[in-house]
Amino acid sequence: MLEITGHTRVFGILADPIHQVKAPQGLNRIMAERGVDGVMVPFHVASADLATVLTGLRAVKSFGGAIVTVPHKTAIVPLLDAVSDAARLVGAVNAVRREPDGRLVGEILDGAGFVAGLRAAGHDLRGRSAYLAGAGGAANAIAFALAEAGIARLTVHNRTAARVEDLFGRLRRLFPDLPLASGDPDPTGHDLVVNATSLGLRPDDPLPLDASRLAPGQRVAEIIMQPAETRLLREAAARGCRTHPGLPMLEGQLALMADFLGMVPPAR
Ligand code: ATR
């Protein structure tokens, strides 16, 4: 970290609870590497206080923006001055930038970060078929990013089928030509298999899909960051699949977050 002076821009991460957040370490490292005079610190904010905090942050001229995480990602959308198309469609924001005039602009980078992580691991998605387990917030963001990355078809499987139809309704508006199917637990025949449910957080969780059907040639990606190796990833590796754990997905997103938040050194 650079020395903090009167010129230092302050960035925050809005969360409750706060102790588990990982983005500040990554973004402070990126700012140091880029020679940016800025610092990211935890903003522990309860849901009931979010609107008040945002009103205050609009007036803080040295505030550059914030990362937004649980439980604020959806609730923050109507409180911002503008959000991107992706954020509006997903209904969630995970990064907010403060413009020089004080306006707060929201973006969702979860899905783009996930795709960037896969690309960095050598997996180009164009023309591939994808199987997605889950239809919650994270799955919505990933589905939009996969569609944007040019996949050829998408199958979504979720415990609650109504959420899949809801996701498809929104996807069709932006990507009318993308073939969509609501799936069963069997991921056979898809190049990329993604777990975007919360199953795997606990060691005794059931698997999000039928891992016994996984076969060599398939890539299996996980959004769960802790534990780093879920039961799904272990089963996938044992069946000869390439695996992508959740942590590099955050890494893939950090540079996008830094760019969005304007973490660039001043022009000389
Ligand atoms: P997030 O924002 O992290 O995606 P979420 O919107 O609550 O969180 O979504 C959680 C996802 O995990 C959903 O797909 C959820 O399935 P439902 O839509 O049926 O709730 C899935 N999930 C969570 N617990 C599950 C369980 N015990 N069995 C199957 N799916 C589960």
Image (cartoon, rainbow, N blue to C red):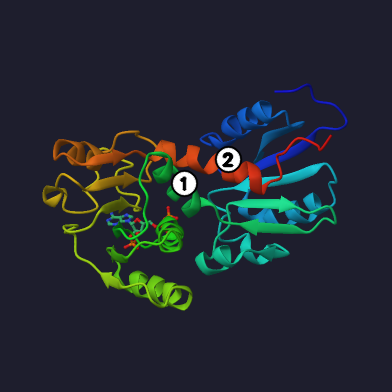
> In the visual, does 138 lie left or right of 24?
left
> In the visual, does 107 lie left or right of 197?
right
Residue 44 versus residue 194: which sits nearer the camera?
A: 194
Say which quadrant the N terminus sits in. top right
Residue 53: x percent and y percent?
74, 51
Tell me if label 1 and label 2 are in contact, CB under 8 Å. yes
**Separation (CA) of disc 1 from disc 2:** 10 Å
| Dot placed on the residue nearer the N-terminal end, 1 or 2 | 1
Q: Tell me the quarter of the picture where residue 63 sits.
A: top right
Which residue is depicted at the point 14% across and 40% down? 239
Residue 206 versus residue 64: which sits nearer the camera?
A: 64
Residue 44 visible, this orientation: no
Q: Give the residue type at disc 2.
A: Ala
Q: Which residue is mark 1?
A: 116
Residue 215: x percent and y percent?
14, 47
Question: How many tags in the picture?
Answer: 2
Q: Give the residue type at disc 1.
A: Ala
- Rate crowding at label 1 as few (under 14), some (14 to 19) or many (20 or more) other CA atoms within 10 Å: many
Q: Is residue 2 above or below residue 180?
A: above
Q: Which residue is mark 2?
A: 255
Circle 2: element type: helix
Residue 23: x percent and y percent?
56, 37
Residue 69 visible, this orientation: yes
Q: Is residue 172 above or below residue 186?
A: below
Residue 83: x percent and y percent?
65, 64
> In the visual, does 253 lie left or right of 205?
right
Residue 22 versus residue 176: which sits nearer the camera?
A: 176
